[in-house]
Image (cartoon, helix red, strand yellow):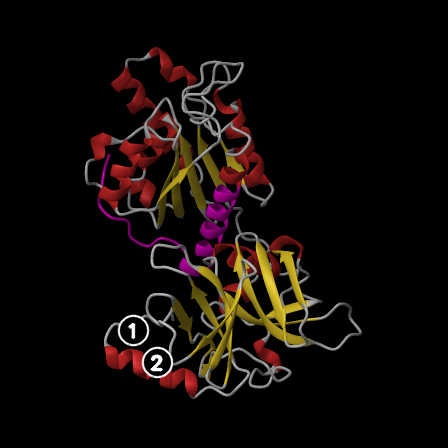
Amino acid sequence: MGFECPTAVEDVFALRERIRALEDGMTLRCRGRDAVGDAWDYGHCTKQGECLTCTYISGDQEFLLVSKVNLRLLLQVEFPTFSAGMEGTFVNDAGAGIPEAGFFQPSVEDGSLQALRAHLRSVPDGTCLACRGRNSFTDRWDYGYCVKDQERLHFFYDSGDREVLCIQAVRFNTLVQVVVPSAFQPALEAPLSGTPQGFAVIAHGFSPECGPDYRLIKRLAATARSRGLHVVIPDFRQTYSLCLGAGRHERIRMLKAELMGCRGASFIALVGHSQGGRASANVCTDAEVLALPLRGCMMLGAEDPMELGELRPMVPDLSIVHAAGDGIISSKYLLKRAEAWHVPFIELKSEAPESTKDPDGDDINHGFLAADLMPVVEQIYGNFLDRCAAASWTLGPVADAPSLTC
């Protein structure tokens, strides 16, 4: 399901009638904006007669008439489905319409609590789920819904209570319970104990002195370890004595060897910075590598892998992240690469001017060392790892890999 975006006039009228048919007090997930060029603000809207009361994560609130609001360009609503056979209007009357079994109750012992948190981190911002919460074990449940916003959940309860909690801090098994899509329930309920560990493989960039101990690489490694992943960082410094072409091919060979050594992992998440990003893109076109449980590849401040041309690395989750002020590798080349491959391109902007260097002579935009870049990169990388982990529970092992070679 997704946001309704009618194009024909008759579809707009049909959507208005569908909203009018809702019982007063019913609440739907929505997104709105003041003008077509503005970014969407996510939240919920409650129907009362001919009026929609829209409350957004930003704190904005507006009152709109069903007959007047632009339901295509300025406000879009969603009629989600929380479980098979149940229409997804949010619960208002003390949970009426959602059976007790509909609220997922994760367990620490079987790993389903970890799986639920990973799933919530992986869903898009603005995703809304029915929920119930309470302040203590002895309190009655308060029913409502929550909206995902980066690492947080915004809770809206029928009692009027509102709260914002970090996903990692929510006590899902005792004080908060959510309704997750029925298609995802088996993956959440599958025991994770005893399964092989996930691997985070990190390919560093040009760094003759530090290599794997470069500050960015160490921060990425810490982010992966905080999620219980085994971290692998090959040391490419021995390749610097070779000529450009030979050095690049040697890095690809070394990276492939490290990845092949992770074949017993439950999943593999690959990230590469600068030269390591170029090597990562190349190794993800190798048939043997693609036969591994490799769930994603992220290119950070990467060299442009121009030798691949239109050949997109065939991993399920591929993205390119670059700093606008990178004085070593211009972001415009990686933007063109992302457009050619039709993959997400995230451009980060720092207050530090282009080509700014730290006392060690490192470009703080290229290395994401600027104070306003590093935390953002850590969050983006953490979300990437969570998506790879969630995919490992839903996709299972890779059966057949495309017949591609470096």
Quadrant showing the N terminus: bottom left
* Amino acid on which the number 2 mark rests in the picture: Leu
How far apart are labels 2 and 1 at the CA level? 8 Å
Looking at the image, is mark 2 or mark 1 earlier in the sequence? 1
Q: Position of residue 405 (x, y in %)?
A: 23, 38
- SS of the residue at dot 2? helix
Q: Is residue 69 visible in the rendered structure shown here?
A: yes
Q: In the image, is residue 210 above or below residue 95?
A: above
Residue 397 is a magenta residue: yes
Residues at discs 2 and 1 in contact (Cβ within 8 Å): yes
Q: Position of residue 2 (x, y in %)?
A: 38, 69
The residue sitting at 38% across, 84% down in the picture is: 18
Q: Nearer the viewer, residue 46 or 87?
A: 46
Region in magenta: 379-406
Q: In the image, is residue 330 above or below residue 131?
A: above
Quadrant showing the C terminus: top left
- SS of the residue at dot 1? loop
Q: In the image, is residue 11 above or below residue 363?
A: below
* Amino acid on which the number 1 mark rests in the picture: Pro
Q: Position of residue 98 (x, y in %)?
A: 57, 82
Residue 250 is a magenta residue: no
Q: In the image, is residue 396 above or below residue 203?
A: below
Name the residue beneath numbered marker 2.
15
Q: Nearer the viewer, residue 400 or 358?
A: 358
Name the residue beneath numbered marker 1.
6
The residue sitting at 42% across, 26% down in the picture is: 366
